[in-house]
Image: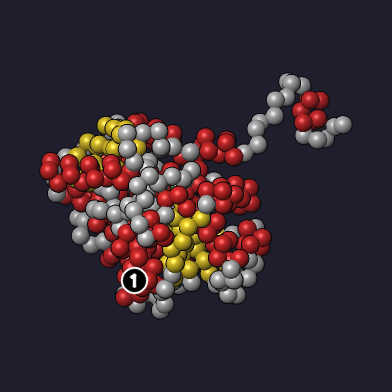
Amino acid sequence: MRQVKQVKYEGVIKRYRDFLPYIKEKHIITILEGNTPLIKSRNIHRLIDPKIDIYFKFEGLNPTGSFKDRGMTVAVSKAISEGSKAVICASTGNTSASASAYAARAGIKSFVLIPEGKIATGKLSQALVHGSTVMQIKGNFDEALVIAKEIANEYGVTIVNSVNPYRLEGQKTASFEVMDELGRAPDYHIVPVGNAGNITAYWNGYKEYYKAGKIDRLPKMIGFQAAGAAPIVLNRVIKEPHTIATAIRIGNPASWQKAIAARDESGGLIEAVTDEELLKTYSMLAQKEGIFCEPASAITLAGLIKLSEKGYFKKGDVCVLTLTGHGLKDPQNAINVSKEPIAVPCDKLSVLKAMGLWD
Ligand code: F0G
């Protein structure tokens, strides 16, 4: 019988060694992040725009349920190589979940600053269970980030927000995976924009593969912000950002200029959609494709629909949408936007009636 050789998967640093050469093997802290599926749309593309191909890069299937793990493996491995004993971050939830898990794995301390009452329960539970010191501040993400940066500068604690360049280095591996799988770059890559690190990281990844001669053309980078938290779109800092998509409730993104560069160099766009629009596509992804992602992730599909309605795409265009986090992070939101369970007496006839199989 023919033997099929299994290649052991060892996380993004080892998989993309040539593009992340500066981490020594002995310092690698990994929970086998990355290697997430690129899922082709089976139903939604027919409803929206049958002439284009839509793929979902489902980053919710990372170890802590979001794309942050790709950056965290590199940032924490680097911190370990420098002898750091603790990490700090400000977060709308996912960065804190990821930092806490990777710090636990590395055996170092983690400190996280989160906006009180504005992070999804699943994310809070993650930071707590991994043993982080979780500090809820009466302020927003932007204010928390200022404090985290100051403490990192003054007290030698490693900051693991995306202002740490190693975070973006790790996150660029998602675009490598997309290109490896498609055998080319997509025509459009659509991402949610919060602190604007991820759009920057994807663009860096595309450019690096292009320079290495692995692809012959680059995609256009398209970003979407929530209408109540759209500083880049409105070209001004938003002092009190608001949106149901708490992950991207950010009014003064750290990588603002880099995101604009990604948009302009690639010939793309950064636009806004309303909470109402993104909640519609959040349910649509769950009900038409079987994919349960975060509200912030669903903004990509809401944005694609808007562009498609304006006739933005042409026949055969390949669009990749990054679904940044898993829907289980925020179960309350899913319950709020869905039908309630039906209360049924405990007998077969009542169940059949509730199923519509008995009059
Ligand atoms: N989607 C999700 C699920 C996120 O958690 C974030 C950012 C983004 C999109 C936006 O990515 O900031 O690189 O533009 N979350 C950060 C956090 C801010 O603290 O977890 P970005």
> Height in image: 84 above or below 2?
above
Task: Please state which of residues 173 and 111 is positioned toward the viewer in this rendering.
Answer: 111
Position of 43 compared to 60: left or right?
Answer: right
Name the spot of residue 128 as percent of width and height, x first.
34, 31
Residue topped by disc 1: 207
Residue pictured at 55% horizontal, 56% vertical: 302
Question: Which amino acid type is marked by label 1?
Answer: Lys
Residue pictured at 40% horizontal, 33% vertical: 117
Position of 352 compared to 195: left or right?
Answer: right
- The secondary structure type at the circle numbered 1 is helix
> Height in image: 320 above or below 248?
below
Task: Please state which of residues 230 and 220 is positioned toward the viewer in this rendering.
Answer: 230
Q: How many marks?
A: 1
Ligand 1 lies under 8 Å from the Cβ of mark 1: no
Residue pictured at 59% horizontal, 71% vertical: 311
Name the spot of residue 333 as percent of width and height, x first.
53, 38
